[in-house]
Image (cartoon, grey):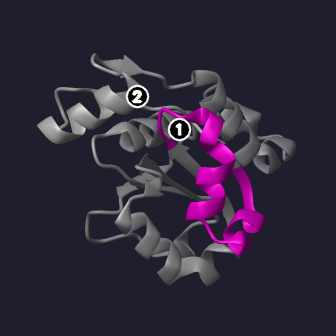
Amino acid sequence: MKTLILYATKYGAAREAAERIAKKIPGAKLHDLKQEGIPPLANFEYIIIGSSIYFGSIRKEAKTFLAQNANVLKEKTLGLFLCGLQPEEEKQFFASNFSSELLTAAKVTGFLGGIFDPEKVGFMERFVIKTVAKLTEYLNRFDDGKIEEFVLTECLDRIDDGKIEEFVL
């Protein structure tokens, strides 16, 4: 029962979330969707895909991957997560960025929080974020409770099979 965690990130928040999830699922394999060499999906029973939200949209590489692999993904135990700083927009972000078929197929979805690091963004982005969101300093809004809930829900069938000792919770 292998797990593949795929992520797309601009400034690192989705990577950090993917790493936090991977730490809780022993043997999980991580892969950045920007990188070549995505492992064959046929080798995995569980697939988790996450992306940062940037101005309301998931990353281009995540959109492309999802569109190209939707039929295969619907046959897997699927988890979808988003990273961002607007948890109140969670339902809208999922509805506008994932097909209804993938959302229905997903065993779990989660909006896990995010990070704003003014050191990593350019002048114009910093200006827009300061004006719109009133953010000027480093902010980490990862929700460890949501991450743990996401992992527990994604792995529930493995836990039901008496394999709880496999998970680091």
Q: Give percent across and percent down for residue 114.
A: 45, 32
Identity, as a three-letter code, of the amino acid under mark 1: Ile
| Range covered by the magenta-colored residues | 83-108
Q: Give percent across and percent down for residue 81.
A: 57, 48
Residue 34 visible in image? yes
Residue 158 in magenta? no
* Disc 1 secondary structure class: helix
For image coordinates 72% across by 74% down, the residue present is 101
Callout 2 crowding tier (Cα within 10 Å): few <14, some 14–19, many ≥20: few
Identity, as a three-letter code, of the amino acid under mark 2: Ala
> Toward the viewer: 1 or 6?
6
Q: Which residue is mark 2?
A: 133
Q: Left of 104 or right of it: where is 71?
A: left
Q: Which mark is residue 93?
A: none
Dominant secondary structure of the residues highlighted in magenta in the image: helix
- Image quadrant holding the N terminus, namely bottom right
State whether residue 133 is above or below residue 58.
above
* Disc 2 secondary structure class: helix
> Toward the viewer: 37 or 109?
109
For image coordinates 64% across by 71% down, the residue present is 99
Q: Left of 39 or right of it: where is 160?
A: right
Q: Which residue is mark 1?
A: 21
> Toward the viewer: 41 or 87?
87
Residue 85 in magenta? yes
Residue 88 found in image quarter:
top right
Q: Left of 51 or right of it: where is 136?
A: left
